[in-house]
Amino acid sequence: MWSLILDNRKLTDENILLRKEVFGKKSEKQTVADDCQLEMIELLSQIVPNVAPTQKDEYIDVKATKRRKNHPGRNAIPDSVETHEHLIDLPEDHKNCNNGCGPLKQIGEQKRTVIVRIPAKYERHIYIQPVYACNKCKDTPVAQEMPVVSPLPRIIPDINLLLFVILSKYQFHQPLYRIQRLIYHESQIWFTRSTMVGWIAEICVPLKRIYNHLVSAVKNSFCIHSDDSKIKRCGHTSYMWPYVNGEQTAAVFDYRETRSAAAPREFLKGVKPGTYLMTDCYSSYNDSVKKYQLIQMACMMHVRREFIEAIETKYHIEYNRKILRFIRHLYRIERFANEKGFSVEQRFDIRQRCSKVILEQMKDSLMNPGITIVPQSRTAKAINYALGHWDRIIRFLERGDLPIDNGIDERVIRDLAIGRKNWIPVMSDEGGKRMAILYSIIATCKLNCINPEEYLKDILMRMAIRPAEADVSDLTPVEWLKARNGGKLPEKKPLYPSVR
């Protein structure tokens, strides 16, 4: 009988989570009815004794009022936008007073701004090379060298059309058939999808050299973020393994046919012993950690996610919220360090003085919940997950430059997840590898707040005039950005003014 009750609890929890996965919101944001100021007092009391108030505060209930927010106004239009002024004036015979007083005098003017979109314009450029030769001596014919008008010599699109196809697919997640139809509606030119696939295949040949440098940048880092995500492959499921270096300046996607231990083992070959590896504790990493003597870390976001799922089952809500408060305090400390621009040493110091205390109290609450928890419940599963990986979870305390979670890697995966909903399946392993190259370069540009179109347009034309064996380390996104800013990395600025 008891086993039936436990099985029923387990199946009920799974049903609740499945319904939320299908019908519920995807956000993990938690709205807790706790006063933020009291939480900060609680946090300070954990760090410095006798900070909490000694007497009970008196509170007065005030009815909430909804105030109308002032509209921020339109965003400013950049000066770089071409401007045309149109004068809408009265006819000359209407510039006299209707009462016969004489001509009217201008007392002001009214203006209205309209932003006009001009559809893309396609042109056919034909480059003609006159060939000359001597009629008497029959010397070798000569002609002016053809200028570099495209990064690839044998394809018909110029750099702008080529980048439109690439970025539409790999940055803005459009499948090729939509890009094909859009080009046709704008120009009445019909490029087959196989033709556009050929363009992508050819452009990935020089970009593979940039990709190899990004792989080296990730492998040579003191810390590597790693995760995996499935992609649709014709006939079966393949996987893309994204890796980000600890400095968060390089991202690499590694295409693999499986999710087995061979995937990270092959990619991480050559990584220095003692390198930190931030993962989701998936068992496929264990072989690589042991073989290459890596130091494995666990993601705090995954711990938080386990307790959020436990709350969704409507059991042990207060206890789960208590654990989430500990995690919230840890992230507040990290945010405080970011806002104040703490150095590595300062961040290490605040982690030792503050975060370590919170983690000790969190572990005590995990080991001694103070309530009866059914072993098959989601709360028990969350507790076992946290305690089972505790040494990896608290490893970020060892250094000030170690991450608390794997959030940067999950943000890199986001573009892949969005695009996955729009594509037709990848038709070959070669197509998956080309996808990895382009996603890696675009993701690295985004990490460094570089416009991918501006970057690719510049380096592709420069690589077109370099020998195939020439060094291209100066053309990686980070080095390209340094060269444009006096040899230093500028302060990162968002690519877009707002997320809204």
Image: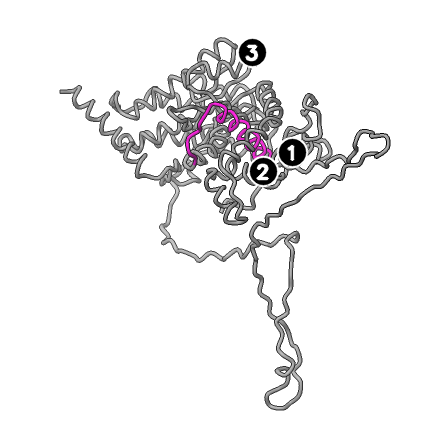
- Indicate the amino acid at tag 1: Pro
CA–CA distance in space, label 2 to label 3 = 42 Å
* Disc on res. 162: 2
Q: State yes or no: discs 2 and 1 in contact (Cβ < 8 Å).
A: yes
Give left or right: position of 449 versus 32.
right
User: Badge 2, how many Cα within 10 Å: few under 14, some, many 20+?
Assistant: many
The part of the chain drawn in magenta is: 423-449
Q: Mark 1 points at which residue?
A: 151
Furthest residue to the left?
A: 1
Residue 358 in view here: no
Q: Where is residue 373 in the image (x, y as percent from the top left)?
A: 26, 23
Magenta stretch, main secondary structure class: helix
- Number of marks in the image? 3
Q: What element carries label 2?
A: helix
Q: In this view, does 81 lie above or below 278?
A: below
Q: Is mark 3 on a helix, strand or loop?
A: loop
* Disc on res. 273: 3
Give left or right: position of 23 versus 226.
left
Q: Residue at x 67, y 29 (%)?
A: 475
- Indicate the amino acid at tag 2: Leu
> Nearer the N terminus, badge 2 or badge 3?
2
Quadrant (top left, top right, bottom left, bottom right) of the N terminus:
top left
Q: Where is residue 253 in the image (x, y as percent from the top left)?
A: 51, 25
Q: Residue at x 62, y 32 (%)?
A: 154
- Closer to the camera in the image, 79 or 163: 163
* Disc on res. 221: none
